[in-house]
Amino acid sequence: MVVEDPLRALGTTEDEEVTVGEEEPRPSKSSSKEDSHSTPLGLTEIDEGKGLLIEEDENKASIKRKLTVKTKEKGPRDRGDLEVTTALGNGQDVGEESEGRSTITVSVTDPIKHVSDHPYIPGLTSSHYEYLITSVFSSSVLSSEFRQVEVRRRFSDFVALADLLNENQRGYFIFPRPEKGTLDAATNGRPEADFIEYRRADLQRYLSRLCEHPVIGHGDELRVFLTAEGKLLESLEWQQLQPLRASIIEGVARLPSQLMGSETSIPNVNDVSKNARNTNDVLRMLREMGEKMRQEVSHSSIQLPEKESKLRELKAGIEAYSDSLVDLSRKSEKIVREMERFASITGDVGLSLIRLAKYEDEYGGPTGQYSEFTSTTQTLASDARRVGMMAVKMSRQERNAAEMTLLSLDPIHGQLAMAPAALDALKERETAFLTLTNLQEDLRKAKDSLVYLESTQNASAMSDPSIAKKIESSKNDIAALEAAVQAADRGYQEITRRNEFDYDRWKKEQAQDFSLISKELSKSRGSFEQTVAEDWDTVNTDFRQDYSGHIRQ
């Protein structure tokens, strides 16, 4: 559904206290499990022999639920309970799926609020929540003491995990983490406990999808996140996973020397496989940004390899698919709203008929005894009550069907979340290709320059020491560029392979999701239609028995 997620709308900045008000009560899901004879729609039912005493709930509007993006504990794909199979082995090729190597059951529970002094402003306090993450590893790979691990993590730890995965697992379709909240969005009238529960469910879903990934699920990043004791950022294992980062200030200081030519502008071999934004090479950032803008503005295109060309076509297809998902989400929202509206109308009709029966019982009988319409009023009251109660029951069933429909459509939200992640991963490959082509162009120019210098030296009758020095420098640059091109090509090929691997995996997931949506929708709607048909058939049978042998006037 393209509606505002309560978790997004209620969020606060990571470590800020949430201050929110009360929200309009929503019906419990347990209402769908009530006995079919219980009183629907917040009414009070009293059997007094004569009929039913009906009391309307003063807050009848509370039965109308808001259509929000729900995070359920157990969905169609059972992602809520986070029981997934993932490998925890060593030495396995990252492109291979692992089957049956290990089972991880993860739960996110027990949020606890911590209040401390503000680190920068004396006299103020800051607060944050920590969540208990319980991981059960059923694998012989881990030591016995790690069979069940409980750690506490705050939201900023989840942010650190997402950032590390985006950098170390470049090219994979990584499920996006929950967004940070803002203080402004937190003041929308919802209680703090509601916000924390939505966030807890969202974090649990996030870990679930990471564990489902056949590569990330057995990566060191997730393993350390789930098992490191104490504060995550202070863990030695976690610090060892962090890539080396030079200061951006150092890169800015080097920029004038690079532009003047007094310092080499050739990227470091260890950095060319990284996105330029994750390095301190400011000149490389500017060059790649400028080249990308030049291609977009001038609509110029370079000759692309066949595989690269096909992957860019896939990117265009994913963008169209994302737009289709947005449209599908809106239509799904409309369907559920129409079901809610139909249930409300049916319930109102039933209530009106029950009030009519009550009125006939109270006034029709006493006044009709002096006329020939006594039996008619009694019949009218009985018929209205019978049909009214069935209409009210049908209203409740329709609401339950609407809720089941909403749950059945939940995979659409997962697909909507994965589409931007897929596009980001494909853009990473395009960035790696841009780095590679820029280095190849630099290498070509360096070789042309070397040919020119050598031809100049050969044409000269006397040896020029300056030209010889330039030739030696050019050869060193070519050697460095060749090493950088090789490293960039390896990085590009690896990211391409990851793109292809995850795209194929995602296509299978799409087929499973939409097959499951069709199955669940057919099941829930068919059950509703069958139940309604049986109930109204019972009403019809009662009518026939009551009027058997009589002509109804």
Image (cartoon, helix red, strand yellow):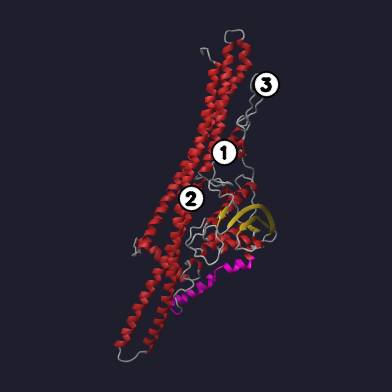
Contact check, label 3 and label 1, Cβ < 8 Å: no
Q: Label 2 amino acid?
A: Leu
Residue 421 placement (x, y as % from top left): 48, 56
User: Quadrant location of residue 70?
Assistant: top right
Question: What is the span of residues highlighted in magenta in the rendered image?
Answer: 234-262
User: Quadrant location of residue 233?
Assistant: bottom right
Mark 3 or 1, nearer chain start: 3
| Residue shown at 64% from the left, 23% from the top | 52
| Residue shown at 51% from the left, 12% from the top | 551
Residue 351 visible in the shown view: no
Mark 2 or 1, nearer chain start: 1
| Residue shown at 54% from the left, 24% from the top | 538
Does 194 sit left or right of 292 as displayed? right
Mark 2 highlights which residue?
A: 416
Residue 236 placement (x, y as % from top left): 63, 68
Measure how far apart labels 3 and 1 are at the Cα level.
33 Å
Mark 1 highlights which residue?
A: 65
Asked whether residue 249 is drawn in magenta, I would say yes
Q: Nearer the viewer, mark 3 or mark 1?
A: 3
Asked whether residue 231 is drawn in magenta, I would say no
Q: Label 3 amino acid?
A: Glu
Q: Nearer the viewer, mark 3 or mark 2?
A: 3
User: Quadrant location of residue 348?
Assistant: top right
Mark 3 highlights which residue?
A: 48
Residue furthest bottom in the image: 462
